């Protein structure tokens, strides 16, 4: 979702800065790059230990979630190809699912803001599984809900943590880096594309 459907990395960074500033802890783009694709709770567990922050990670994640939802509702910007690529993939017979490290309320707010609610058969949050990316749990749970073997699934990701999670799940992975992840190592990817519309030739070729 983040960085694939929604130009959300700037939104996530702004929300993280708001929370960190509130608690007097520094946060910059170098730190942010470390946490792209991870759940907010896992990110704040690391940041809390690193900066000696007093609130529990779960409380910091709650503050982040509220800030991010406010920003998404105010100015959600779809990535190039959204929703056209999804509509055409559905029309070609592909089943679509959304698997994200974001909390369920953030997923719901994003899908609603972008008008995509009818396109996804399944939505799975990293908060619903035991471990976040780069562990494979969120993708394995998505495949389970679709009643599909992992090998029949194709993941579209924008981060290295997401790519590692997809490969650990035994799934093929197309990476479409966003501006924040252009420098990530995507060596294990099955395909790398420049923008989401470039996915259609891979899906629709004979």
Image: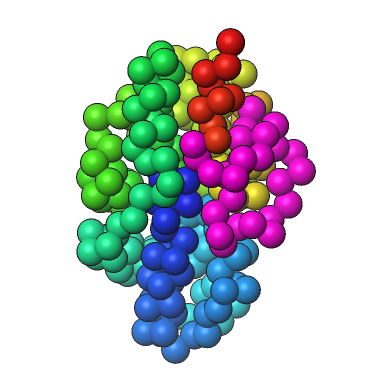
| Residue 137 showing in the rendered view | no
Task: Measuring from the top left, give residue 111's x and y in whole percent.
Answer: 28, 43
Task: Measuring from the top left, give residue 164's x and y in whole percent.
Answer: 66, 42
Give above or below for 32 relative to 190.
below
The residue sitting at 54% across, 32% down in the picture is 199
Q: Is residue 140 magenta?
A: no
Asked whether 107 or 95 is in front, the reply is 95
The residue sitting at 62% across, 73% down in the picture is 30
Q: Is residue 167 left or right of residue 39?
A: right
| Residue 113 showing in the rendered view | yes
Residue stretch in magenta: 172-197
Asked whether 175 or 102 is in front, the reply is 175
* Res 149 quadrant in image: top right
View extreme (right): residue: 187
Task: Measuring from the top left, give residue 171's x and y in whole percent.
Answer: 62, 27
Asked whether 189 or 49 is in front, the reply is 189
Q: Is residue 190 magenta?
A: yes
Give above or below for 81 relative to 54.
above
The residue sitting at 33% across, 63% down in the picture is 68
Give above or below for 82 relative to 18.
above
Q: Quadrant of the C terminus?
A: top right
View extreme (top): residue: 206
Q: Quadrant of the N terminus?
A: top left
View extreme (bottom): residue: 24
The residue sitting at 49% across, 15% down in the picture is 148
């Amino acid at each position: 979702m983040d960085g694939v459907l929604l130009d959300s990395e700037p939104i996530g960074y702004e929300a993280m800065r708001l929370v960190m500033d509130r608690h007097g802890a520094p946060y910059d783009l170098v730190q942010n790059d470390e946490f792209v694709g991870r759940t907010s709770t896992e990110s704040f567990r690391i940041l809390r230990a690193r900066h000696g922050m007093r609130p529990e990670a779960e409380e910091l994640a709650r503050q982040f979630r509220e800030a991010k939802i406010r920003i998404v509702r105010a100015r959600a910007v779809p990535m190039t190809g959204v929703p056209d690529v999804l509509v055409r993939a559905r029309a070609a017979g592909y089943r679509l699912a959304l698997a994200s490290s974001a909390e369920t309320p953030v997923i719901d707010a994003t899908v609603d803001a972008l008008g995509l609610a009818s396109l996804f058969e399944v939505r799975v949050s990293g908060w619903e599984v035991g471990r976040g990316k780069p562990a494979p749990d969120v993708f394995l749970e998505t495949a389970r809900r679709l009643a599909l073997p992992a090998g029949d699934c194709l993941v579209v990701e924008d981060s290295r943590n997401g790519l590692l999670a997809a490969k650990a799940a035994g799934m093929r992975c197309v990476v479409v880096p966003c501006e924040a992840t252009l420098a990530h190592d995507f060596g294990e990817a099955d395909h790398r594309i420049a923008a989401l519309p470039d996915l259609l030739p891979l899906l629709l070729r004979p």
